[in-house]
Image (cartoon, rainbow, N blue to C red):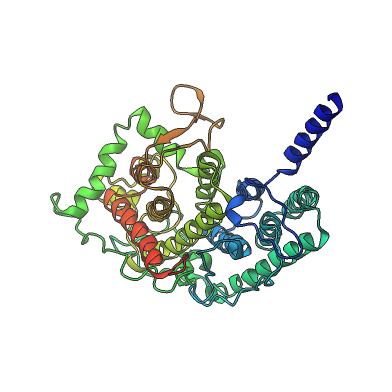
Amino acid sequence: MKQKIVYAMVLIATVSLSNLSCRKHSNPDTNGHQQQTKTYSSDVVKKWLGVQLPLLYSPAVSYGVNAGRYMAYCGVALYESVVPGMPGYQTLSGQLNEMPQMPQAEPGKAYHWPTCANAALAEMTRRLFTFTPATNDAVQQLEDQLNGAYAAEIGDTAIFQRSIAFGKAVAGKVVSWSATDHPWSSLPPLVLTNNSPGLWWPENNNPTIANGLAYWGDTRTMVAGSIENVTSTPYVYNDEDVTSPYYKDYKEVYDLSKSLTYDQKRLAKYYDDPAVGGYPSGSSYIAVFKQILDQKDPALDIAAYAYARTGMSLFDATIGSMKGKFHFMQERPFQFIRRVIEPSSDPATWWKPFISTPPYPDYPANHAVFSGAFAQALTTIFGDKAGFINDTYKGKMIDLGKGSEDMGSYSYNSFLEFANAIAISRVYGGIHTRHAVEEGTKQGIKTAQNIDSKVKFRRE
């Protein structure tokens, strides 16, 4: 009897150790037993995001406005590497802009979807995150670690190798596709020639703008037509009539700057990523996305779906926002305030915003567009009542007038609430007008909605 109890305990322990990624574990076999993607946890996705985030944080070399681009292509590669195990879902090939045909899984053969995902995300990270020398070592370490665990879990060399090959083949196709999305890279820098009132001019007075910023709006969108009819027009310029919408928009920024509350200052600094040497160029959204996966803990299928859908929304929103900025060329608050509301010939007395002004035009507000698209995509996946906690900068210290303190975290009842907080934080920071952030949020939402109407993840 004692021997039977010991045997049972060993058997239970063995099953527990083997269940590394599977929610409803049943080993696939070479004859074609196919476990669905939804039976696995999303741990592989969380772990790869955990590798990518330190690479994005304060990188040695600037990667420009690329964060959404990395998320979009990694999300598509992840999704395509596991979608054969998702009945009811379909490939995005033929739906996304100039996307090539994807490799096909072998009919009747079994695949281990976490291994496919590991291979795809390893290859995507290795070949896209080339701006820091830390990439290769970080990728190799996690790829080997997960492969070791998955090989032991599967217990079948043929399935294991087949899964790796499929994931890498998908990533190879996606990387090649990504290399054709930015024809502006060969264009000369934009040289500004018009410094008229109402038009943006760089604070450093250098009229030469790097093409990575000036022509980012010409990047190929992930979804054809996603940024059509999403941008509204700014208010008509008026620096004389104090009752005009234009004047009042800038005057509000000035008035707020004179009496910012502690909470307004904290919000402005929290979403001013450079304030803590943090995530530049909108990559903080990837950090937030990982936190959402950690808190919601979806299965692998939903995680892959969310990654692709949210990434392409963020990417296309970035393109649309930069396109609008360099089309309207609207001045920043510091320009109007220094010229009209509080003019001074002495630079030492010039009005300054609470946070630093980025080196491109005001309208529409980038982060409002980004967060609107990001929030809309997540809402369609997790619902409009999906609360979450953003602790991206918890543990980072800042002085808001009370001495050094932890930046802490923010709790939100919905993704739209999160987007609205980011939008208004830019007004408190003194770098955008209310009209720029409100219309920017709408633009981001419309961009995500356009994508939803054009791309069908599920089979009809």
**In this view of the protein, which residue sits in the foreground, 146 or 238?**
146
**In this view of the protein, which residue sits in the foreground, 434 or 377?**
377
Whether residue 350 is visible, yes or no, is no
Q: Residue furthest right?
A: 3
Q: Residue at x 48, y 56 (%)?
A: 310
Q: Residue furthest front?
A: 1
The image quadrant where one finds the C terminus is: bottom left
**In this view of the protein, which residue sits in the foreground, 272 or 8?**
8
Residue 145 position in % (x across, y down): 78, 47
The quarter of the picture where residue 410 lies is top left
Whether residue 89 is visible, yes or no, is yes
Q: In the shown orientation, is residue 315 left or right of residue 78?
A: left
The image quadrant where one finds the N terminus is: top right
**In this view of the protein, which residue sits in the foreground, 252 or 31?**
31
Q: Residue at x 71, y 63 (%)?
A: 110
Q: Residue at x 55, y 52 (%)?
A: 303
Residue 459 position in % (x across, y down): 46, 68
Residue 298 position in % (x across, y down): 53, 46
Q: How many marks?
A: 0
* Image height of 274 relative to 311, above or below: above
Q: In the shown orientation, is residue 236 left or right of residue 38?
A: left
Residue 268 position in % (x across, y down): 40, 39
* Image height of 6 relative to 20, above or below: above
